[in-house]
């Protein structure tokens, strides 16, 4: 169960859209897995947790999606 960062705060970062949040988080997690394999082997966090932390901290921002 994910406790931190809170999903409500993460959703706000994605303009209130949970689908955009999930896409951004999964793409960033894949980037982390391919670029930081050695670091992940010794880390206590998974790539998706690191990606969500980065979104919460503002280091990764969802781009604006035109409807």
Image: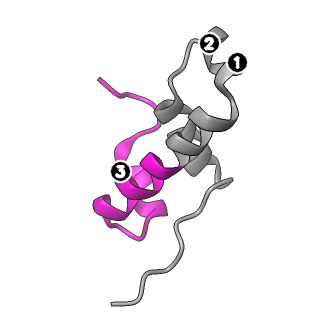
- Residue 38 tag number: 1
Which quadrant would the N terminus be assigned to in this image? top left
**Which comes before the other along the chain, label 1 or label 3?**
3
Residue pointed to by mark 3: 8
Determine the image quadrant of residue 43: top right
For the residues labelled 1 and 3, the Cα–Cα distance comes to: 31 Å
Contact between labelled residues 2 and 3, with CB atoms less than 8 Å apart? no
Dot 2 surroundings within 10 Å: few (below 14), some, or many (20 or more)? few
Q: What coloring was used for the rendering?
A: one colour
Left or right: residue 13 compared with residue 66: right
Q: Residue at x 51, y 42 (%)?
A: 30
**Which comes before the other along the chain, label 3 or label 2?**
3
Which quadrant would the C terminus be assigned to in this image? bottom left
* Residue 58: image location, x then y, percent: 64, 55
* Residue 6: image location, x then y, percent: 40, 40
Q: Residue at x 62, y 20 (%)?
A: 40
Magenta span of residues: 1-27
Contact between labelled residues 1 and 2, with CB atoms less than 8 Å apart? yes
Q: Residue furthest bottom?
A: 67
Secondary structure beneath label 1 = helix
Magenta residue check for 39: no
Viewer-nearest residue: 51 or 29: 29
Viewer-nearest residue: 25 or 32: 32
Left or right: residue 28 compared with residue 12: right
Q: Residue at x 47, y 37 (%)?
A: 5
Magenta residue check for 5: yes
Secondary structure beneath label 3 = helix
Residue pointed to by mark 2: 41
Viewer-nearest residue: 11 or 50: 50
């Amino acid at each position: 169960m994910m406790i931190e960062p809170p999903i409500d705060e993460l959703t706000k970062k994605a303009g209130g859209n949970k689908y955009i949040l999930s896409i951004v988080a999964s793409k960033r997690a894949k980037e982390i897995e391919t670029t930081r394999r050695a670091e992940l082997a010794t880390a206590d966090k998974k790539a998706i947790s690191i990606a969500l932390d980065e979104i919460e901290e503002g280091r990764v921002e969802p781009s604006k999606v035109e409807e």
